Image (tube, rainbow, N blue to C red):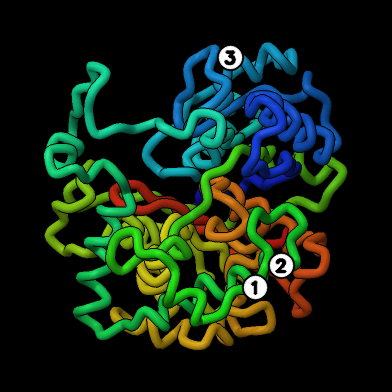
Amino acid sequence: MIHYAEKNTAISGIGQSQIERKPTMLPFELAVRACEQAIADAGLRPEDIDGAACWPPVPAGAVTGIGAAGIADISNSLNLKLNWWSGADSAAQLSPIMEAVAAIAAGYATHVLCWRALGERSAPSYTTSGGGGWVPTGGMEWMVPYQAPSASIWIACHASTHMTRYGITREQLGAIAINQRRNAGLNPKAIYRDPITMDDYLTARMVTTPFSLLDCDVPCNGTTAVIVSRLDAARDLRNPPIVLEAMGARSHNKMGSWLGRTDYPHQAMHDAAAAMWTRTDLTTKHVDSAHIYDGFSWLVLSWLEALGFCAEGESGAFVEGGSRIALEGELPMNTNGGQLSEGRMHGLGHLYEAMLQLRGLAGERQLKKELNVSLVANGGGDVAGALLLRRDG
């Protein structure tokens, strides 16, 4: 019988900075604070941390932008004594978690600090369609000449194809944004908390068909950090450990391309989801809450189908009206408001919320039902990662 490495690991500590739409402090300082919180939450000291991982790889000296805190700077600021570290890649925002699991399995580390640090509101232009000597490479070579450097355009192509093919309506898509804004109203950290109606959604300014402003995530400054520990070590710490039951990251069809898959409009999420389910005996019926990447609202629909919560083309009907995915529904989803309302914490915000729910610490939005298993799914396009978390025991 195969024993997968992630089952011998757990999340032992979590931390998250304030989430800022209007910056009040340097994004790197937010990162330091989140990392300090995660270490303290686990009942550890900085000298106990022997591994570190972040996504994407961030050079020393970066303090704003899409990556606002590199390993060298965090290590030096916290006086960490690292045996192992990695600027992770491939599995999108869950890459640091997967790297941590591998390091623990190999015996390189016992407690790995992982984080995602964002400073987009302090340096909002991290990509451009030209000028300044920038030469597009890779997939950008095919998109920049058509003035399409933004994911809002690439994902819109996928969404339009999928929704047209299966008759999914904007009203069905809007149920995601409306439900998540309702959840955000119970989240003191969320950037947007005022409720929205279907009329608000349908009359919002269009960005790229079928997306309006309310379908797009909200750039912000902030950091989420977690400690991944060897399971036996985690059991001796402050909090009951939350076990990493199964992880998946796979890209088997035209890796490196957003638009070139033979099964378009599928994306790497379909590969990652399938990989995760091969590593566990659990099924969708065991999932008590879902925390699904929503850089754009349609990504939620695609993930729901990829993960098997509904059949191909049935995700619109699955979320219609919002009752099934509401806090009191059969599959509560993005209970913190997600990236559409809380802010673009770039995937690890979903992991943080899943941990709060499993610990019973989500405040007014805490789910009333018993929680044993939560699902986190991150990424879009050619990078994706999926993770099942469960209570220990």
- The residue identified by callout 1 is 195
Considering only order in the chain, which callout, 1 or 3, is on the residue closer to the N terminus?
3
- In front: 329, or 210? 210
* Amino acid on which disc 3 is placed: Ala
Q: SS of the residue at dot 1?
A: loop
**Amino acid under disc 2:** Gly
Give the distance between the C-alpha atoms of the residues marked 2 and 3, in whole angstroms. Answer: 37 Å
Query: Marks 1 and 2: in contact by CB < 8 Å?
Result: yes
- Identify the residue at horizontal 83%, vertical 34% (top origin): 40
- Residue at image x 83%, y 48%? 239
The numbered mark, 2 or 3, whose residue comes first in the sequence reads: 3
Quarter assignment of residue 61: top right
Separation (CA) of disc 3 from disc 1: 41 Å
Element assignment for label 3: helix
Locate residue 84, reporting x and y percent. 57, 20
Where is residue 370? Give x, y as percent: 76, 76
Q: Report the amino acid beneath label 1.
A: Pro
Q: In the rendered view, would you say 307 is above or below 351? A: below
| Pick the front one: 358 or 340 | 340
Q: In this view, does 301 lie above or below 169?
A: above
Q: Residues within 10 Å of mark 3 (few under 14, many from 20)?
A: some
In the image, 128: left or right of 13? left
Q: Which mark lies nearer to you, 2 or 1?
A: 1
Q: In the image, which disc is placed on residue 185?
A: 2
First along the sequence among labels 2 and 1: 2
Asked if 327 appears above or below 92 in the picture, the reply is below
* Residue on which the image places disc 3: 72
Q: How far apart are marks 2 and 1 (CA)?
A: 7 Å
